[in-house]
Amino acid sequence: MSGHSKWSTIKRKKGKADAIKGQIFTKLGREIIVAARMGGGVPDANFRLKIAIQNAKAANMPNENIQRAIQKGVGSQDSSNYEELIYEGYGPGGVAIMVNIMTDNRNRTAGEIRHIFSKYGGNMGETGCVGWMFRENGVLTLNKEDVKLSEDDFLMLALDKGAEDVKYGDEGEIEIITAPKDFQIVKEAFEKEGFEFTNAVIAMIPETTMEINDLEQARLLIRLMDYLDEHDDVQKTYTNFEISDDIIEQLS
């Protein structure tokens, strides 16, 4: 996820192709394994596992795959010793990029991610070089057509339930923004009223965004983000760039 930007829309569309290739199931399974290993295999007592399972089901991951991943986590059936890392760097034009990694070999992964950055006009930086440009938030996504309230009324409803803000996207989506500690409370409050979320994540949201108005730079950035996303050890990517409407039309 890349925050409130047109890149996030492009990324969600391409996610369907990733699912066909099976990559997304591998990443979701790895998240379930680590969540179960860290907090146990009972979703109601392990918030991270509960969210991981919900996201896996939303991606149509088979229940048997989910249960197998949980058992690997709690039973240590998976010999891989995954560790979580955050790599930070810059893309073409100085855009900020954060990469959430889960790997069993940090030296191999670091070299491969550094190569992807440099191949597409960016460079991997030191820890903290861009992290200060982002804040951690919960993001709950709804289809706008499922919300029958006016924007003002829906905002008041969200704030009343503990959310921090509501964002309306260009593709008919509504994002409810929460503090990480209030994420589950707000999610459950909406679900009790019959709302269904298309996505629910804790994500790094950029404080400000950069608009890309150059076609070649946009193409290079998209290739960079694509190759990062497709790497087996990359769980999530975050960036602070937006592609202008004119450039999106040329990319279509």
Image (cartoon, rainbow, N blue to C red):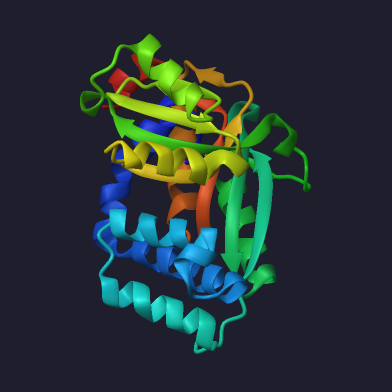
The residue sitting at 44% across, 63% down in the picture is 27
Image: 170 above or below 15 = above
Out of 250 and 32, give the one closest to the viewer.
32
The residue sitting at 53% across, 73% down in the picture is 36
The residue sitting at 53% across, 26% down in the picture is 241
Residue 156 shows in this picture: yes
Out of 102 and 181, give the one closest to the viewer.
181
The C terminus lies in which quarter of the figure? top left
Left or right placement of residue 88 versus residue 14 in this view: right
Residue 243 shows in this picture: no
The residue sitting at 74% across, 45% down in the picture is 125
> Residue 208 in the image: x percent, y percent?
62, 21
> Residue 66 in the image: x percent, y percent?
35, 72
Image: 44 above or below 114 = below
Q: Quadrant of residue 64?
A: bottom left
Number of numbered discs on residues: 0
Left or right placement of residue 139 versus residue 123 in this view: left
> Residue 94 in the image: x percent, y percent?
65, 29
Image: 83 above or below 247 = below
> Residue 102 in the image: x percent, y percent?
58, 64
Out of 74 and 78, give the one closest to the viewer.
74
Left or right placement of residue 138 versus residue 131 in this view: left
